[in-house]
Amino acid sequence: MIKPIASNKRNGERFSKTFCEFFAGIGLVRAGLEPSGWRCVYANDVDPKKKELYENRFGIDDRFHLGDVWNTSEVLDRIVERPFLATASFPCVDLSPAGYRRGFEGEHSSTFFGFVEILARLGERGPKLILLENVTGFLTSKDGADFKAAIRSLSELGYAIDAFTLDAKYFVPQSRPRVFVVGAARDLEVPGAIRANATDWFGDGFDRAIERADAAIRPRRIVPLLRSIDPPPELIAFDIPIPNAKIAPLVELIDLDLDQKWWDEAQVQKHYLMMNDKHRAIVDRMIAAGESFVGTIFRRKRGGSTRAEVRFDGLAGCLRTPRGGSARQIVVAIDRGVLRMRWMSPREYARLQGAGDYPLVENEVQNLFGFGDAVCTPVIRYIDRYILTPVFDRHSNPIEPRLAAADSNRRMKDPVISA
Ligand SMILES: C[S@@+](CC[C@H](N)C(=O)[O-])C[C@H]1O[C@@H](n2cnc3c(N)ncnc32)[C@H](O)[C@@H]1O
């Protein structure tokens, strides 16, 4: 049953709390948005295996459009209700250092421009807010030229831009830094945010606000990158505090019972010998001391040989799609002097993406591909809490101009950006 939804009418425009989810994958953006009342009016992905997972989780209806984002007319025909927000976790494979590094010349990551084409063709029916998500390699691909091209195209469509990073490790025990770009239609009020534009960068507190923000959210390289775009986009800095949620320790997300598919001794020994001397020494010491330990291993090519790299920092490595086998994560446990290892299970992948109760399908590899590619749900919830829902709410209930002026004066005096 479709839930009742918030809606608003302003300047003759009526909006519901609706969104379109492009590059929807298995729908973890949607999973992060729905709890605060966002309603998905359209989802798109080209992969039928992702669609199967998505529909397993959200139910089968005609909102999921299985098709290429470049089929612009088909996509436009399917967007019947105007979205307030459009999200796009476009493919990272050409932007990631672990991928091909072809940048926007690659056929995968350049699908971003299929999304831009749709925004352009939606015209007046276009969303007021945009949220992009990608790997941090998006900032460095082609020495920043790809990132700048992406921002320029959103700016040309009339969006003011904020860009920041958030790591899933602030919410779950997984290292997963990601870049997020928010585009806000220029006529939107952006509560708590500071605006800057080409002619006024130095006058309105924007610089000081950015400088005071924690490097974890606004790495130094983002600001000069945004500044070097020609023509200069209008910029915004949303007020995003540094997350300080209590995080479940990795050991609570890993199944340690003997019913799991633990490897036989030969395979454990093989991976033990693949560790470098330093890691093997730490493992030896913990076994000798009878200590308990739960961690993860990635296999990596180092100087012509494959190494089993153990993480001892309480975090799982960044989940990836298990192409070629080496990208699949391994669980390592030491319990009363016994060293055990096995492949990480799809359920553990789901937990590490903050979606522990997601219904899985039979095919293990399909589940792993789905979750390895996905966004970490609590990160989306966080962005929703501090940016998306406040912007929607302000648009629904605009404050009086007199109060808005007072609010803006206060911010100019004390443009503190973190909590
Ligand atoms: C990074 S994943 C998105 C993951 C998603 N946010 C989630 O949480 O599952 C990128 C997605 O883009 C999809 N994709 C790739 N090329 C596409 C195209 N031409 N049209 C539509 N979707 C495409 C892939 O199938 C993949 O699911």
Image: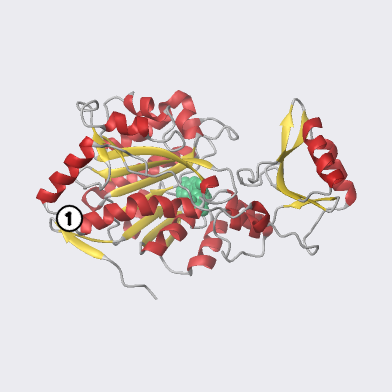
Instruction: Give the residue furthest to the left.
Output: 402
Q: Is residue 93 above or below residue 75?
A: above
| Quadrant showing the N terminus | bottom left
The answer to whether residue 258 shows anywhere in this view is yes
Check disc 1 and report the residue beneath it. 398
330 left or right of 249 in image: right
Question: What kind of colouring is applied to the model shown?
Answer: secondary structure
Q: Determine the image quadrant of residue 232.
A: top left
The crowding category of the residue bearing disc 1, from other C-alpha atoms within 10 Å (few below 14, some 14 to 19, many at least 20), is some
Across and down, in percent, residue 348 comes to 65, 57
> Left or right: where does residue 286 sit relative to residue 395?
right
Could you tell me how many numbered marks the image carries? Answer: 1
Residue 164 picture location, percent across and down: 41, 38
Q: From the image, which quarter does the C terminus lie in?
A: top left
Q: Is residue 301 above or below residue 399?
A: above
Residue plotted at (65% across, 46% down)? 314
Identify the residue shown where x is 85% and y is 47%: 267
- Above or below — where is 15 with respect to 183? below
Q: Nearer the viewer, residue 45 or 359?
A: 359
Q: Nearer the viewer, residue 44 or 357?
A: 357
Q: Is mark 1 within 8 Å of ligand 1?
A: no
Q: Quadrant of residue 307?
A: top right
Residue at horizontal 54%, vertical 56%?
354
Q: Is residue 46 visible?
A: no
Name the outermost residue toward the bottom: 1
Q: Position of residue 119 (x, y in %)?
A: 31, 46
Q: Residue placed farthest to the front in the image?
A: 289
The kind of residue on which mark 1 rests is Pro
Residue depicted at 36% across the width and 61% down the height: 38
Q: Secondary structure at mark 1?
A: loop
- Residue nearest the viewer, comparing 108 with 193: 193
